[in-house]
Image (spheres, rainbow, N blue to C red):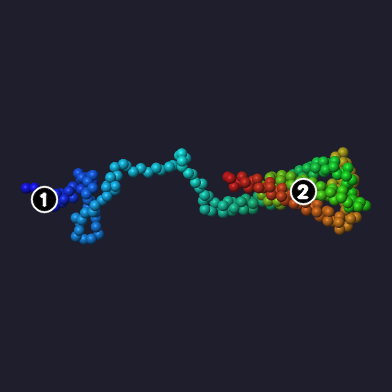
Amino acid sequence: MEDGPQDRTEDRRRRTGPLGETRGDPEATRRVPTSREGEEGETQRVPQGETGREGAETRVIRTPGSPGSQTEEQAYPRGYFEANEEREERLRDIYGGVDWLASFVGCLIAVVTGLALLALAALVLVPLGFTLNLAGREIGTAIITGLVVVGFVLFLAYLFGGYVAGRMARFDGGRNGMMSVAWSLFLLLFVAAVGSFLPGRFFNVLQEFVQNTVLPTVGGLTELGLLGAGIVVGALLMELLGGFLGGRLGARYHAGIDRTS
């Protein structure tokens, strides 16, 4: 007895699925779960494109450092900069402040550099008629030009001296750079006060420098009154500015190393 068309359809439905024999049949159906009760045997036609995934699906995972991979910079962990600032504050509290040795060495470097630069500037300024003794002199173009050059020389001298002081002190570079100026004033007053009582050729040279250069310059500025006071204040400000900036640059070197480490 032959099966009817309805029986053959039911038989085809039973054999459909992952283990069925009609894989390429466009009429193939698959049993799917439904949310409605009492219809467990319901079937649904599945398009051939979904059931025909014969090739294996692959995923390409690129590891860091492999060709074609993109590496992203890892951000610093949260709180890194705060911890670094706290560490710097603790170190500054312990090792900060005025470093007397560093500022003294910076003073010596500034004095030597200033004398060398003034000697070079004198080769140009003296032929123009400029002298440091301004007593009885008319303030003209040559005097103004010479004062500007001297101010710039003082700035450069204490910029170098402040840099050395900041590098040696590591912390509070600006303060130690300005302290180099204070050391210079102290040494100048010390040499002027006791230089005549100290024996030796070296101190004789210092005494002659004070008597022939420093004292006439101070006397000439005193005769100028307010203008002379303004020149002195301007020179002092140039020294302090150079020392402060030089000290900050010297301390910045250590700050850069601390950030990278």
- Residue found farthest to the bottom: 37
Q: How many marks?
A: 2
Residue closest to the eye, 170 or 3 = 3
Camera-near label (2 vs 1) is 1
Name which residue lies at 78% across and 51% down. 238
Image mark for residue 182: none
Residue type, mark 2 in image: Phe
Q: Position of residue 136 (x, y in %)?
A: 93, 52
Residue closest to the eye, 22 or 141 = 22
Name which residue lies at 81% across and 52% down. 235
Residue closest to the eye, 216 or 11 = 11
Residue type, mark 1 in image: Gly
Residue 11 makes an appearance in the image: yes
How many angstroms separate mark 2 from mark 1 (CA)? 113 Å
Q: Residues within 10 Å of mark 2 (few under 14, many from 20)?
A: many
Residues at circles 2 and 1 in contact by the CB criterion of under 8 Å: no
Q: Position of residue 159 (x, y in %)?
A: 74, 47
Quarter of the image with the C terminus in it: top right
Q: Secondary structure at mark 1?
A: loop
Q: Secondary structure at mark 2?
A: helix
Q: Disc 2 designates what residue?
A: 155
- Residue found farthest to the left: 1
Name which residue lies at 89% across and 52% down. 139
- Residue found farthest to the right: 136
Q: Position of residue 81 (x, y in %)?
A: 56, 52
Q: Residues within 10 Å of mark 1 (few under 14, many from 20)?
A: few
Residue 41, picture quadrant = bottom left
Name which residue lies at 22% across and 52% down. 31
Image mark for residue 4: 1
- Going by the image, does 88 lie left or right of 31? right
